Image (spheres, helix red, strand yellow):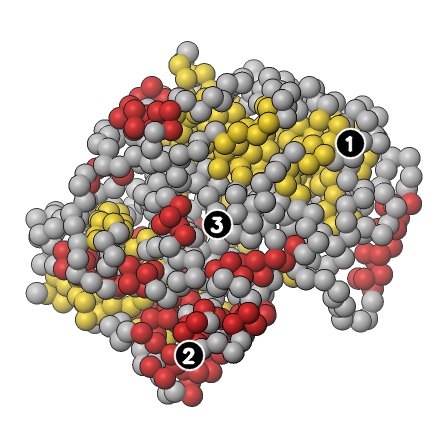
Amino acid sequence: MLRFLLVILLACPFAFAQANPSSNGLESPATTGGAKRPVTDPAKRPMTFQDLMAMKRLGETAVSPDGKWLAYSVTTVNLEANTKTTEWWLQKIEGGEPRTLDVSVPGDSGLQFSHDGKRILFLSSIKSSRPGSQQIVIADFDSATGNTTNTRVVTDIKTDADNAKWSPDGHFIVFTSTVYPECPAISFENSSGESCNEEQDKAAADSKVKARVFDHLLYRHWNHFTGDKRSHLFLVDLASGALRDLTPNDPHDVPPDYPTDPLGCGCAISPDSKELAFTENLDPEPAISTNADIFTLDLTNPSAKPVKVSTSPGGDFSPAYSPDGKYLAWRSQARPGYESDKFRLVVYDRASKTIRNLLPKFDTWVDEFSWDGPEAILFVSGEKGEGPVYRVNVTGDDLHRYGKAAGEWSSPRMIDHDSMPYLIGTLVRVGHPAEVAIGNVLEMDDTAVKIQLNANSAGSAKNITSTTYEPKQITHLNDAVLAQLDLPKMESFWFTAADSTKVQGFLIRPPNFDPAKKYPVKFLIHGGPQGAWGDAWSYRWNAELFAANGYVVVMINPRGSTGYGQAFVDGVNNDWGGKPFTDLMTGLTYAEQHYAFIDKTRECALGASYGGYMADWILGHTNRFKCIVSHDGMFNAESAFGSTEEDWFNIWEFNGKPWDYYGRPDSENPYRKWSPSLSAKNFKTPTLVVHSQLDYRLDVSEGFQLFDTLQLLHVPSKMLYFPDEGHWILKPQNSRLWYKTVNDWVDQWTKPTAPQSE
């Protein structure tokens, strides 16, 4: 699950120099103010929004079982047409030019190689017999040439197919489809189920009445209404075409998109193809529950019922069988109702039916993982602004960190390459969009860190000196564009918070940097609040683009941020405007004192989601900023509780429901103590409010309330409203308007015609 979003803050002058600046792969601060740093390459130019939109975006990836081929989706933006087009590319991992996969068409998704590498599957609406209906397509694949033949559509289900997954024996495919639970179960033998679903869809589309009746919570989620359909798991036999609903008796009150796993359908098939493991939340009130569980289902018995194998009261996600079938691993949380509890890696012994936490002393999140043979697991964990890959054996007593390659990894897997073990995955950095990269694990292995973490002796490595290792880039989607751009490196700094906690911050200088000049600041606040800034690229809040028009960008990871241990994450709970605020203010003060080129009289705070909340909090608690940008923020904590769709979030973060505190003084009521609306009489800073109609995570009424308050207080303010966006601004031309409006607002209040000289 995703968390709130971006934040900002400032405070005390207590600070310390980073003990080992090179330990996280980022540049260290120039404590003298950077006067001796060279001016950036004048042959390159600052990035523009048009450059950002011209970049091709790497999406899904798939590696053939023999480790020879890489398939990946590439999205191209047409700004003027306001469209994004995705297509599949294929290339050899050992080298060679990429080409478009010859059987796919724009819009196809979900490509996978079969376990024997002789076929591929993907999801397509173009190849469906019914226009607009997404179905599963398979084709034969020749690993010697990379050619595909004998393309055929294998489903024609009227409720569409999604999240397809090959069985290891190649005889069937499991997928999801959303159905009306009151209709008969869809099967090969009985067509009445499909007919019932088709008739209800047609009746809803043809009805002149578009009103809705709700009788349960979680009736809307993120940017859409959940409707009456529910997500079921299906199996299609490839030889006969027989179709079977694997979960026909799911409770009718479980919405179709909760709790789907963040990494897909949340399901896995055992190596012998006899058992299915999947994620589901059967709590009667899903709006207040995060307790997704792992279930297994005997696929050899059509009458079998799902069996719950997980035992944690918190969320359990991402089941994956070991290649030998002995174990089932998944990500597990211990505390119910807390979507940002530590994600642990647990292993279920299928024979003994016992569950073991593989890393009891590992203190950062296991973000995603994959098996590396039958005895080891690869996983990614965010740490101090980076996302290194780790490898642990099934006994948990041998843990390696492949941490010498800077950046954030995802989709890691191990392959044999040149008779050596290599790690292949997606790598992203703050100055470089995502590309597929490959690295020799013997050279990436961080021995010093491995010694500290061996046998779970520590939760995370601290102040470890590592030489940098540069993996080989396999894809080259944006080399031509990036070669023209001046993208300054991100620098890391550490400071001491008011309570003596060590906190990390980051800074990006403007292009064509001149150390003799003073520059205004864009102070970015991350969301979540359990999120983090780090060495990663973004198309929505791009730090390099924010710096491109002459700004220093400062980012702090305050209490609540991930990558510094679970106690640091928990530091925001029921303290939204407390330690996170002082962390932010202290961090900005530290940057002002240690980077002489910062003009502290021209600073603007910008945040979205929780960052929008913090922007609102800043409005009432400091006047140090020249302007503020509040995007999709929480303004009134009590009204936000009643208008969000995920009640578990506010119940955890504010330690109860609003009525639990009625009759108590505001100082004892967290919904009022931490509500920015109650400090409105202090609002003075010019503020841009941004909010979207389809944001059901933080309802648009929060933005309207803030703007109304600012206008009545005669505080200079403006509101940017999107009727067709949700929590994120995703449409290309809307994104262009967003960046222009935000940057113009910041320029209006902070930036003269040219950077000031000292």
Where is residue 406 drawn, in percent x and y?
31, 36
Pick the residue in front: 656 or 467.
Answer: 656
Residue at figure coordinates x 34%, y 45% from the top left: 564
Asked if marks 3 and 1 touch (Cβ < 8 Å), the reply is: no
**Which is nearer the eye, 379 or 553?**
379
Q: CA distance from mark 2 to mark 1?
A: 57 Å
Residue 363 position, x and y percent, is: 39, 39
Residue reaching furthest to the top: 419
Give the quarter of the figure containing the C terminus: bottom left
Which residue is denoted by mark 2 in the rendering?
Answer: 678
Name the quadrant containing residue 314. Answer: top right
Tell me the residue that label 1 is attached to: 236
Q: Of tags 3 and 1, which is closer to the observer? A: 3
- Indicate the amino acid at tag 3: Ser
Task: Tell me which amino acid carries mark 1.
Answer: Val
Residue at disc 3, secondary structure? loop
